Amino acid sequence: MFLAGHGDKPATRASDIRKGNVACCPIGGTNHHGKLSAAKKNAESNKEFGLPEQRKYPMPDASHARNAKARASQMEHRGKLSATDKKKIDAKADRVLGK
């Protein structure tokens, strides 16, 4: 974690993290992680989704696969996702991750 605007200095104070004074990436203090636009999401084939019939949990790469596993776990714990659907998402994510 890096302090916003401080280049390579690590965030050492919890107050900086709580106040949001921490940049996700050291490149300009902005988030450069991949996000799918609606156009890219719609262009993907159904086989790239954890739940293809609903086109939910897109997994075009390893980053999205890890995120899908985490979100599926959260939704299962909240009671908004069945154990069967979570297993489908985890299986697809594991294939993308090469596990």
Image: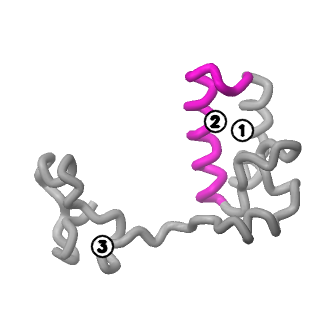
User: Quarter holding the N terminus?
Assistant: bottom left
Residue 1 falls left or right of residue 84: left
Q: Is residue 5 left or right of residue 37?
A: left
Left or right: residue 45 compared with residue 29 = right
Tag 3 residue: 29
Kind of residue sitting beneath label 3: Gly
Its colouring scheme is: one colour
Badge 1 marks a residue whose secondary structure is helix
Horizontal and vertical percent for residue 59?
A: 71, 56
Residue type at tag 1? Asp
Q: Amino acid at mark 2?
A: Ala
Residue on which disc 2 sits: 72
Residue 27: say if magenta.
Answer: no
Task: Write the residue at 74% across / 46% down.
Answer: 56
Cα distance, mark 3 to mark 1? 32 Å
Q: Is residue 11 above or below residue 55?
A: below
